[in-house]
Structures are given as structure tokens and as C-alpha cells.
Image: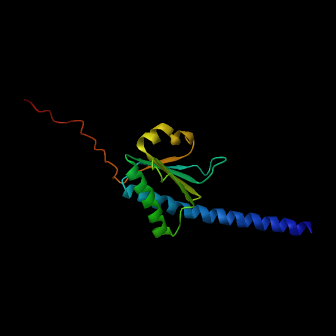
Amino acid sequence: MNQKIITFVNLIEEIYLMVKKCEASQVEPLVNCIVDAILDKKGKEVTSIEIGKLPNSICDYFIICHADSTTQVHAIAENIEIKVQETLSEKVWKSAGYDNSIWVVLDFVNVVVHVFQTEWRDFYKIEKLWADAPIKKHSDEPELAVKKTSARSKKIKI
């Protein structure tokens, strides 16, 4: 009898680990899709925070951005929902904040998105709460190549 219980527990643990691996492999495409949707609508300072490895984390990632107007906050949040549905066939589990659009939260279970109006992001400083987690900044602009100038630059006489 005890051997059957041990075998059953081991089977449950294996299933749990397989589900976690499956979920982890699906998180990266979701993060990328969300970031692309934000950048499409010109969201500012797009940041992803990998909080999943921290103790007592509520999800795998937070994605945070801001916009200058409530209209843009609403448009960004709406675009995220549309792009994720079209690209990954996933729907947001819960959302809040559309009524005033100063801070819209979209909960995709493994990824939680915060779209702030600029002044509210500055006020809440949500990134500081998760400062010990890996943080990545996202941009649609190509990285600037830094050119080194020659040590023997020519001087121009006037």
C-alpha cells in the first residue's frame, strides 16, 4: 500500500514539473507579444521584470510602461488584448482600470501588465518594489552605435 502511495506522489510531482516547463515555454512568446503591442502604440519606457524566481512571486513577469494621456493608456491596453488574442489565442484573465485609464492592469496569469499614465508611474515607482529581480528595458529603436574618434584628430586653424 505504501509503495502505491509513493508511486502516486512521484507521478503527481512529475506531472507538476511537466506543466511548469510547459508554462515557462509559453511565457516568453507572451512577453514578446505584449512588448510588441505596447511599442506599436508608442508606449514609453517599456520594462519587463522577471519576478517568477523570487520567493512568493505572484506571476512570472511584470511588464510596465507609461503614456502621456489617458487616451493612449487605453489604446495601449486595448492593443495588448487584441494582439495577444490574434497572435497567441489567449485572452486576458482579469483587467482593471479601463474606466479612468490612469492605470490599467491586465492579468494574463503568468504575466501581469501595468500601463500607467506618466505621472502615476512616477508616483508609484512599481519597479522599485521588485528591484532584486532581473529587469529588461525594451525599445523599438535600434541601438546606437558608438563611434570612437581617432586620437589624432585634425585641428582646424582659423
How many callouts does the rendering have?
0
Is residue 47 visible to us here?
Answer: no
Tell whether 11 sits left or right of 27. right
Question: Residue 95 placed where, x, y %?
Answer: 54, 56
The residue drawn where x is 86% and y is 66% is: 5
In the rendered view, tell whether residue 135 sits above or below residue 16.
above
Q: Quadrant of the C terminus?
A: top left
Question: Residue 53 placed where, x, y %?
Answer: 62, 50
The residue drawn where x is 46% and y is 59% is: 34
Tell whether 139 sits left or right of 132. left
The residue drawn where x is 63% and y is 49% is: 57
Tell whether 51 sits left or right of 18. left
Residue at the front extreme?
99
The residue drawn where x is 59% and y is 61% is: 24
Question: Residue 127 placed where, x, y %?
Answer: 51, 42
Q: Quadrant of the N terminus?
A: bottom right
Tell whether 7 sits left or right of 30. right
Residue at the top extreme?
158
Question: Residue 126 placed where, x, y %?
Answer: 52, 42
